[in-house]
Amino acid sequence: MGVTALVMAGGKGTRMKTEEEKPLLKVGGKPMIQHVLHALKNAKKIDEIIVAVSHYTPKTATFAKRFSVRVLKTPGRDWCSDVQYAIKRLHLGAVLTIAADLPLVTGEVIEEVIRHYERCRKPALTVTVPLETCRRLGLTADYIFECRGKSVVPTGIDVIDGKRIDDGRMEEAILVVNDERIAVNVNTFKDIEMAESMLRHSAR
């Protein structure tokens, strides 16, 4: 199955309270979005990479063009609206959406997600981590829900069948991955410090 990766990089990033565009904040000396693009390029099941930007992230748009990826300007209203806009505008099929602020994600993780999507036979897949993983790392969670008796937190990675984007609420599978790397969704400078520490540890 060929999958298009849609990197969501058009948000305001207001919680960071910095003038720098959030996707360009550096982790380990590189902008966060560069780590995400590197992971996607290492995922064999990804056919194409599209970076969704908005009027809030013009520098990110310029930066992304250096990596031979497609850049699409979206309205910048919110995550769901911009995903729908991109899918309809580009007539996309299977789409893996991923936040630009997951600097520790790897091609291996992305491959695992896509394999699970292929097996689940549902039009949508939401990738989560256990709440206990976030708490162990000292991370805060904006949204928590129950899955098979456990509290889980969305990671910012999903896969959907773009051909069914107008179906309304799609039936979805929930993938729970106990992986600290995708638990670190950067929303604070403390999160950046944690991500950098984990990068240094993995490099040893």
Image (tube, rainbow, N blue to C red):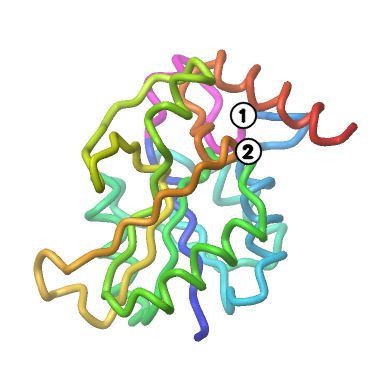
| Amino acid type of the residue tagged 2 in the rendering | Met
Q: Secondary structure at mark 1?
A: loop
Toward the bottom, the furthest residue is: 1
- Give the label on residue 32, or none: 2
Badge 1 density bin: few <14, some 14–19, many ≥20, Cα 10 Å: some
| Residue 25 percent location from the top left of the image | 61, 29
User: Which segment is the magenta one?
Assistant: 12-25
Name which residue type carries label 1. Leu
Q: In the image shown, does 144 or 29 lie closer to the viewer?
A: 144
Q: Is residue 145 above or below residue 120?
A: above
Residue ID at (31%, 80%): 121
Compared to residue 69, the image places residue 148 above or below, namely: above
Give the vertical position of 162 relative to 137 (above or below): below
Provide residue 93's location: percent of width, then percent of height.
37, 82
Q: Nearer the viewer, residue 40 or 82?
A: 40
Q: Residue at x 50, y 20 (%)?
A: 136
**Label disc, if present, on residue 122 of the rendered structure:** none
Q: Does residue 55 belong to the magenta stretch?
A: no
Assess disc 2: are there few (<14), some (14-19) or many (≥20) residues with their C-alpha within 10 Å of its C-alpha.
many
User: Quick one: SS at disc 2?
Assistant: helix
Disc number placed over residue 25 in the picture, else none: 1
Disc 1 and disc 2 in contact, CB within 8 angstroms: yes
Residue at (16%, 68%) from the top-left corner? Answer: 170
